[in-house]
Amino acid sequence: MGAKNEFEAAWLDERAEYFAGVHSDILKLKFQGVFNGKNIAIVGSWNNAGEINQILLNLGLKLTHIADNNPKKQNVSRLGIVSQSVESLKDVENLIILVLNNYFWKELQFQLSSLGFVEGKEFYIIYGGDRFRRNSLRSESIKITDEVWNKYKKCVKLGYQSYIEIREKYGGLPIWLMHQPSLGDLYIFSMFLPHAMGVDSVKECECVLVVTKNSVKKLANIIGFKYIELITFEKAYSNWLALMRLAGDKFNIHNAVYHGLNNIFQTLVHYSDVSFRDSFTKYVFQFEKEVTPVYPQFPKRREHVLEQFKKYGLIPGKTVLISPYAGHFIATITDKEWRYLINSLKDKGYTVCTNCGNAEERPLPGTQAPFIELSDCIEFVETAGYFIGVRSGFCDLVCMANCQKIVIYETGAPAASIAYFGFKSMGIGENITEIINDCIHTDEMIDNILEMF
Amino acid sequence: MSDIEIALKQAERGREIVDTYTPDNKKNNVIAVFPDDDDELLSTAYKYFDRFLADYDYAVVITSIDIEKLSKYTTHPFEIVRINDEDMECMLRYISVCGEASAATIKILSLKKPHCQKAEILNGFKDLTLDKIVCRGLYGIWGEI
């Protein structure tokens, strides 16, 4: 074999090794349940898109989006998919982004983080195995380019301006930044905040809560926060957190969740028995000893809820509210399986309805979705008598409701892990039956649920 | 000068330090920062130093404390750079603000620095041992330890 062919052979071997590594890296993520019910985008691998697509197909996964920063590679068909800009991925729901570029991974990492995507949750860097990973972490990558550094400085300055506006508006009260746009996070945080501030209830907490989503603001109001500010997620994630990472020790701002400032707690989650509750009590609030949660009180609007029951033909005390949707994952329960559960419950004399958080969440087959105000969620499930929910923030809100509650977790889905989010393991809530869907014996799981009715 | 201007100036200085000691001529480098004279932490960090370096071709250790005996714990190539406390604070601010962009290639061996680390309380909580915190949380070692 001549020198040129030897070179080509080596190059082909290296490519084969790279794609074998990519296959292996994606396979690991698949086993972790990362792709369950998600759209999949690839970024930075225009030239290798065909190979990556084939790897995904071989793993039973479907590529849905291709994004690139080069304008010439946007809005053109690639593998039958119309490509798009990286920025426009923000508008895609239920998305996992795979970064496949061992030269520009750092820039893409920065770009995606700045857009509000969370590494290890919403995007993953695929190096193609250990050898390529090591090569990617070469010396050049330690040095941050002037362009990236200038962006960080800009973020810090913008974060500072925004912080000063709020600080002055509230006369220097401590500020808690709840950048995670999640009802469950706010609910659990609020159970322990009074302890941290030395008072008995959220209403007495003299602090400002900064949130990034309207529904979270609404819940904060219901829980009793006096001073609430809504800013965009991007502003919070890029600017405020950059400010806090740089100089959080100089200002009266606190991070309300365990992530955003560093990754130490997140790294340890996968290697320990710590729970979602611990992320607040131990890490956010740094409590030396465990404290008793202060459960937020929700208003009682019994007449309004009863009117809804009448409007939707639901029987008080004999209705099952099913909550099948979660913010960070789609449960592996098919329409056919839901239908079987619903029809069986109806056969037993129950009326059934679906909890939908927004217009895109459709009612389950054979049910309607009454609009349940956040403030009415406890009254609603107590009036219904029964609640079945896929693990989500909504389950946190109703964890103390006086009714039969069944929460479904899912094997391999980090967002529905019973070890981390389980109510029993957290010591939160009362009388909750916790069930795990292993996604193989789902029919049996549903039969087990039906035996409780 | 305001607090924010001072912090940004410190971070600029921190960037100069990192860039100065980042070797340009070697691939697959890592920088390990030792800012903390916590004996228990240091002895655990020493114990896993060899395993940590096995993932890299070359390392630069930047420290503001005495860790000369670190070289007894490994045969992998690395060098130690000593800086003063003031420069260490500058560097920590820089590394911290860069967040994920620096996390893969710069490891800070401390439970309390930079200011947002706040990990002292995790030591001994549930099944979190110092070994686990150092290996997984600080060195970022993958796989078996």
Image (cartoon, coloured by chain):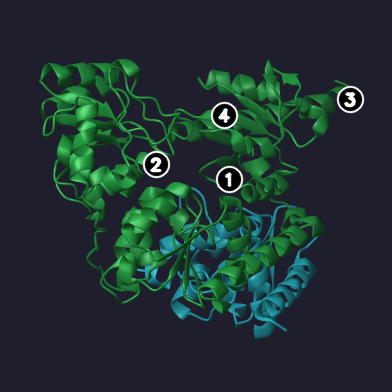
Chain colours: A green, B cyan
Q: Which residue is mark 1?
A: A117
Which numbered disc, 4 or 1, marks the residue that appears first in the sequence?
A: 4
Q: Which residue is mark 4?
A: A40
Q: Are marks 3 and 2 in contact (CB under 8 Å)?
A: no
**A278, above or below A431, in the image:** below
Which numbered disc, 1 or 2, marks the residue that appears first in the sequence?
A: 1
- The residue type indicated by label 3 comes to Lys
Q: Chain of mark 1?
A: A
**A371, above or below B68, in the image:** above
The residue carrying pointer 1 sits among few (fewer than 14), some (14 to 19) or many (20 or more) residues within 10 Å by Cα, namely many
Q: Nearer the viewer, residue A69 or B143?
A: A69
- The residue type indicated by label 1 comes to Phe
Q: Which residue is mark 3?
A: A4
Which numbered disc, 2 or 4, marks the residue that appears first in the sequence?
A: 4
Q: Are marks 1 and 2 on the same chain?
A: yes
Q: Which residue is mark 2?
A: A415
Q: Are marks 4 and 1 on the same chain?
A: yes
Q: Is residue A19 visible?
A: yes
Secondary structure under tag 4 reads strand
Which numbered disc, 1 or 3, marks the residue that appears first in the sequence?
A: 3
